[in-house]
Amino acid sequence: MLFGAESTWETNMQNALCLKTTVLPGGKIEIADAELPSGASVDVVVVLPKSARLPRRSAVEILESAPGHRIFKTAEEVDAYIRKERESWDR
């Protein structure tokens, strides 16, 4: 179903394509429609059903999932790094 402006309407209206799809394993979605122009950049908005709740994650869990993870694993490693950094300022 395509929503949007016809040639006689305002030219600043955007076309929108409203589709339903199923979330694939790994949290992926796939969108295929002949109306989509090949190579065009598009915005995608995902609306979750009200019953779907995103799991709450702690700040540590979010940091651990980030690429590269954390540089330091313990507070002692942070202290040692800061100490070496400060010593290098005195040189």
Image: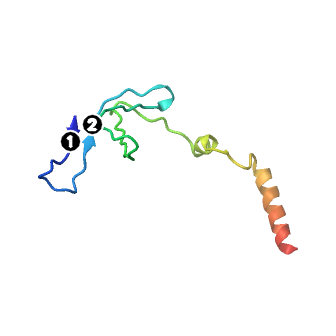
Cα distance in 3D space between marks 1 and 2: 8 Å
Q: Is residue 31 left or right of residue 15?
A: right
Question: Which quadrant is home to the N terminus?
Answer: top left
Question: Which quadrant is home to the C terminus?
Answer: bottom right
Q: Please name whichever residue, 45 or 10, is drawn nearer the observer in this view of the structure.
A: 10
Residue 53, x across and y down, in percent: 41, 34
Q: Is residue 86 left or right of residue 3?
A: right
Which disc is residue 3 wearing? 1
Marks counted in the figure total: 2
Relative to 32, residue 15 above or below: below
Relative to 27, residue 37 above or below: below
Residue 3, x across and y down, in percent: 20, 41
Looking at the image, which residue sits at the far left?
Answer: 8
- Rendering colour mode: rainbow
Q: What amino acid type should be assigned to the residue bearing mark 1?
A: Phe
Which disc is residue 50 wearing? none
